[in-house]
Image (cartoon, rainbow, N blue to C red):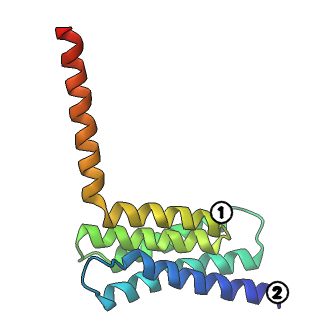
Amino acid sequence: MFGLIIFALKLVIAAIFGALLSYSPKKNLIEEEIIRSSLLCLFGAVITGILVQLNIENNFSAGLGIIAVLFTIISLTQNNAFSKRIIWIFSGLVGVIIGLGFIFKAIVLLFLLYYIVWYEKSILIYLNESVKQSEDESFKNVSG
């Protein structure tokens, strides 16, 4: 009974995390993408959660489950744009991580991915400014 409660909790968390990965407060709400991302995250959590529940000692089955999740996501998203495919692949991987029981690691990955995907321009501006500063410092050292 305790295993069922944990499995249900993993599924709820995976559905929420998958929806969060495609949700952006800055852009128009596209419900279809949020639902797809949530379902793919849920799919990854279901496959690996069942493998964990079976309590198989070898890592071959876990690796096979991860490959199956990735192969399924890649084959389902063949005709989509690259940026959507990457978001959905990472959504499935977050689901796999949740299904394996590493919820806090999934939270860290989710926040990192969310920041990279939805705040990419601020990251690029920061990187561009740091490159300009390092180039200016090298010229100062030569002239001084």
Which residue is at 78% across, 73% downward? 55
Farthest-out residue, front: 144
Disc 2, SS: helix
Is residue 37 found left or right of 2 in the rendered image?
A: left
Could you say where residue 83 lies in the image, as x and y percent from the top left? 27, 68
Q: Nearer the viewer, residue 32 or 44?
A: 32
Residue 134 at least partly seen = yes
Characterize the local packing of mark 1: few (<14), some (14-19) or many (20 or more) Cα atoms within 10 angstroms: few
Which residue is at a point 63% across and 66% down the rendered structure image? Answer: 104
* Three-letter amino acid code of the residue under disc 2: Phe
Among the 4 quarters of the image, the one containing residue 12: bottom right
Kindly state the secondary structure of the residue where label 1 is placed.
helix
Marked residue nearer the N-terminal end (2 or 1):
2
> Would residue 4 appear left or right of 82 to someone viewing this image?
right
Q: Residues within 10 Å of mark 2 (few under 14, many from 20)?
A: few
* Viewer-closest of 66 and 85: 85
Residue type indicated by callout 1 = Phe
Distance in Å between CA atoms under marks 2 and 1: 26 Å
Q: Position of residue 61 (x, y in %)?
A: 65, 68
Q: What is the quadrant of residue 115 in the picture?
A: bottom left
**Residue 25's quadrant in the figure?**
bottom left
Task: Please state if 2 lies on the left or on the right of 66 as rendered.
Answer: right
Residue at (24, 84) in percent of width and height:
28
Q: Which residue is mark 1?
A: 60
**Residue highlighted by disc 2:** 2
Camera-side residue of 133 and 73: 133
Q: Could you tell me how many numbered marks the image carries?
A: 2
